[in-house]
Amino acid sequence: MRRSLLLALLVAALAVLAAGCGGDDDDDGGSAAGTTTATETSDESCAKDQLDLVSAGKLTIGTDNPAFPPWFEGGTPKGSKWEINDPSKGQGFEGAVAYAVAGKMGFAKNEVEWVVVPFDQSFKPGPKSFDFDINQISIKPERAKNVDFSEPYYDVNQALVALKGSTLAGAKTMADVKDAKLGAQIGTTSLTYINDEIQPSKEPSVYNTNNDVISALKAKQIDGIVVDLPTAFYVTAVQVPTGTIVGQFPDAGEQEQFGLVLTKDSALTTCVDKAVTALGDDGTLDQIQQEWLADKANAPVLQ
């Protein structure tokens, strides 16, 4: 009897020890659960009611004014502050992308507000009037010192527009462009491309707005302008019907990409990145590109 009692006590002790070892496994499992919880917490931090926004309950998006096709479409309602197009219509490539990102972040269309932000102000240092800005802004290291960029939403090349019948209109190579008087908007990658890659013999003309660049071309103050390729299609179709797309330029060693702009070290950047990545993964960005840019992405390359 005593032996049975001792045996029972021994079995009980072994069970306790086994439970203790199992407890270590549970701790490891707890760590894994902790990781999951952290991920869930991270997801929860991107919930709409947890976001640190410019205006509570609203997603504020910035872009320049005028809002040009093919980036924004749909006209401007009477009395609107917007010229040419109203971004709130959600039309055009960037209009559609903006609302797709907003949707992924949990915002309905009526919970999105638009503010006017001049292009060259969007990536300057300092506080911002927007949660993110979308305005054909190329991701560049020097800009990233002052602001955050999202994951890219579009790959783009620069293009050359000249007047039909001009000497420059017949250019086939980069060398053919060397002696031209070129123009571009201040602060743009178009201007950077002129200076760093084309390196023309004549100093390029620099303008505050793209409208000023267009006016200079029409007045024949410059031989040609450099803009991104989709914009070149709009320029020649609407703004300068006497203009022609001479060609697109080759990449300058690295593919140029557009990204959404946020305040430096913004708490929103991770959440916006998740939205852009998800839109790329599920094919939405490709669908939007096909809808708005499919006929505006091809032109001969000037080698």
Image (cartoon, rainbow, N blue to C red):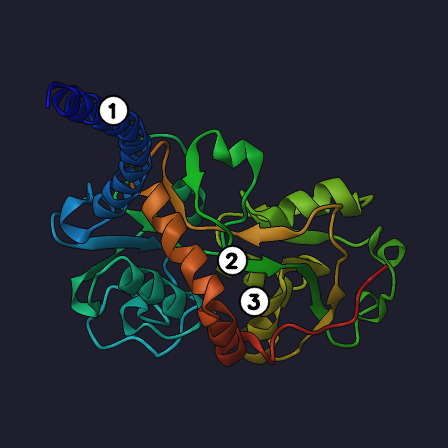
* Whether residue 19 can be seen here: yes
Q: CA distance from mark 2 to mark 1?
A: 81 Å
Chain-order first, disc 3 or disc 1: 1
Image-quadrant location for residue 16: top left
Q: Which mark is residue 14?
A: 1
Q: Nearer the viewer, mark 3 or mark 2?
A: 3
The residue that mark 2 highlights is 210
Chain-order first, disc 2 or disc 1: 1
Chain-order first, disc 3 or disc 2: 2
**Is residue 291 toward the left or the right of residue 105 in the image?**
right
Q: Residue at x 41, y 60 (%)?
A: 278
Classify the position of the C terminus by image quarter. bottom right
Above or below residue 202? Residue 280 is below
Above or below residue 161? Residue 258 is above
Q: CA distance from mark 3 to mark 1?
A: 77 Å
- Percent across and percent down for residue 296 are 60, 75
- Percent across and percent down for residue 6 are 16, 19
Image-quadrant location for residue 68: bottom left
Q: Residue at x 43, y 49 (%)?
A: 119
Q: Nearer the viewer, mark 2 or mark 1?
A: 1
Image-quadrant location for residue 199: top right
How many residues crowd around disc 3 within 10 Å: few (fewer than 14), some, or many (20 or more)? many
Q: Residue at x 27, y 47 (%)?
A: 43
- Percent across and percent down for residue 80 are 22, 69
Question: 258 or 234: which is nearer to us?
Answer: 258
The residue that mark 3 highlights is 231
**Is residue 152 toward the left or the right of residue 86 in the image?**
right
